[in-house]
Image (cartoon, coloured by chain):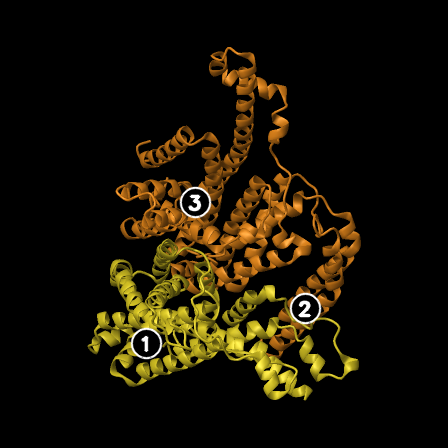
Amino acid sequence: MRKNLNVIAAYSIMMGLIILVGLFQSWNIALSIFNLCLISAVMTMGANIQWGYAGLINFGIMGYTALGGLAAVLISVNPVQEAWSAGGLNILLSLFLIIGMVLAVRYVLKKYEKSKTRTYIIAAIIILGIIVIRFVSEPGIEAIEEVDPAKTGFLGGFGLPIIFSWIVGAFFAGGLAFIIGKVALGLRADYLAIATLLISEIVIAIIKHEDWLTRGVKNVIGLKRPAPYEVNLQQTDWFINLVENFNASKLNSISDFVERQAALNQFVIEGSSVFVKLCYSGLFLIVVIILLILTQKALYSPWGRMMRAIRDNEEAANAMGKNVVKQHLLIFVLGSAIVGIAGAMLVTQDGLFTPGSYRPMRYTFLIWVMVIVGGSGNNFGAILGGFVVWFLWIESAPIGLYLVNLTTAGLDDTHFLKVHLIESVPYFRFLMMGAGLLLIMRYRPKGILPEKIEIK
Amino acid sequence: MDFVNAIILLLNYIFVPALAYGSQLALGAIFVTLIYGILRFANFATGDMMSFGTMFTILFTWYFQSVGISLGVLPTALLAIPFAIIFMIGYMLLIDKFVFKYYRVNKSPPVQLAMVSIGVMFVTQAVVRIIIGPSDRRFFDGEKFLIKAGEFKEMTGLNEGLAIKSTQVLTIIVTLILVSTLFWFLNKTKTGKSMRAYSDNEDLALLSGIDPKKIVMITWVIAGILATIGGALYGLDKSFKPFTYFNNMLPIFAAAIVGGIGNPFGAFLGGYVIAFSEILLTYAYRKFFMYILPETMEPGGLVQLLSTDYKFAVSFSILVIVLLYRPSGIFKGKVL
């Protein structure tokens, strides 16, 4: 108990802050912060597995998040029959061609020794393949995108419950990580960072511009929900009764029936959105707890010990007969898969998929700030980092506004400096993140909750 | 005649823009490479440092415009750049003193320095947005075109016009002057040579009496000059927007690595490699083939290898290929 005192204290402070937001701003805001904190925590856990356990630097988090989001779309949206009949055949054919191309490259790689000719042959296969695929897919893509472009214009998905996409998202992200890992894991740390950052940009470019698959920048809206809809809740009897009981004391003080009914309606409307958010919180909390148990188990298992050995001294681990390359690939895939789950969760909560919103600042660098601030190598630290940083990211604008008002209190309200500062309040979050990261790295380089391994 | 038209077409839409864009990338890439070669970390704040320098250029340009100083046909920004450079260098030395120095003295691993540079990136981004705001700013004044498309057509009687913006010429000339001065400095002067020695082998350089403090300071000074001029030229040619500058970091990194990181000449050429391949692969060649081929063979589609949406993806793919087959870059060899 005493050993974990700092963990408990840190989490209680965090929860207290969120409850304060609930009391002073509104429970709606507090819960949406809490939900995004949970999603951030999942992402941070994924990044922490790679960085904290194995020392792999992965700046491609944005790409895996987006792939998770794509999974949510592909799983939950109903298939667009017309689009399938218009161009489905071409797309399937192209898919087979891609598989054939990959197999051909594999065959050449296996069959022949490494030489210049082999490189040329592979290059020729790939270039020819791309040209053929373009010819095959172009008419199909055009036909698909012409099917009711205002509403669909894409193939749609499988029409399954969206919750499945959390698993599928993990597989998508893991698959991408496998390819990237095969390609890039041999690079030095900072090269790996740059390479993964750029590859994730390529992934985003593809998701943004392949309209037949993702609707691109036209966005996919109105995705299915694992939680009830507010409108339906507001007309359900048991929910109205629940809200009535919950607010009984306030309602009873109103004697007038019409007024009482109006107040009840207001409570029901507010209550319904809080209830929906609570449903999401419950789902996300389950994911976070499952992942936490698994990652904790992994951390203390012989496998976790081996990962730390590899991280701390690669050569020695290699000499002891550990397959460093294979383990790096494995952990790269695992961490990315967890980030993929978070990506699917994010789209599930928003109910919409907006490829244009994936930007490295928000989805890569911010997550890294979370990992570093929270404490790399410590799962509790990583989750705490997700909470703290997301909380500050959202609440820094109000805090900034307060500070601006405080420091410029002597100035006239129309003074240009004050107006300018108030306009730029949203950017205080960058300042806060940057300053926070720099301070933590300087004075507490292991994070708020540093890595602490006890051998049991 | 058709052949000349085709050539002019390529010059107008590919060669001139790519040369200008490549020069802007080249300056940024040399900046990255210098920091990497001498201070030994990947600077993720590159784009934002460039936007910081450009911001001061814009502020001084506005000041000069308001007091009525101008350079006639040339943009006023040229006059503002030296003042902006002074502020930029001051900012960089300040950052170095309070942030990077600690890690350098402690000999932290490069990854840690890269992480620290992310913190600097956040702070710089905030400072720029708080001072000048996130919106698009144009600060170009003076004569816009050196040759207008219409004039060119009249002059030569060709179908295709060749438009050359003065900013493009300016970019290329300034880049050439700056880069040749830099190479002269690195190769011929004593300080430049000691910088190269320091980058090659730190311990040996220290033993032979090179002052590391001086080397680091001069590196930041050169970096400040490069970042400000590179950023200002990009802003003059296109426009200034903090977010675009942040994004430009990616092709700049690509250019630096493709050229062989730590090698300034490689970075210089890498900028052009990236710029040309981006534009060559995403240009629609339909009109070009219409001039070249007989009418019966005219292509039906746009004859575009990749849609322009994939412009950035092209440079990143080149980078990935280079990293796979030649991790030390195209012009490998010595460090710096």
Vertical arrangement, residue A234 with respect to residue A67, above or below: above
Residue at disc 1, secondary structure: helix
Specify the quadrant of the image occupied by residue B263: bottom left
Specify the quadrant of the image occupied by residue A182: bottom right
Residue at disc 2, secondary structure: helix
Q: Position of residue A433 (x, y in %)?
A: 37, 49
Q: Residue at x 28, y 60 (%)?
A: B95
Amino acid type for the residue under numbered disc 1: Asp
Chain letter, colour yellow in render: B
* Chain A drawn colour: orange
Does residue A235 appear left or right of residue A252 in this picture? right
The label nearer to you, 2 versus 1, is: 2
Q: Nearer the viewer, residue B211 or A265?
A: A265
According to the picture, the residue beneath numbered tag 3 turns out to be A299
Q: Position of residue A189 (x, y in %)?
A: 42, 62
Q: Chain of mark 2?
A: A
Q: Position of residue A64 (x, y in %)?
A: 54, 52
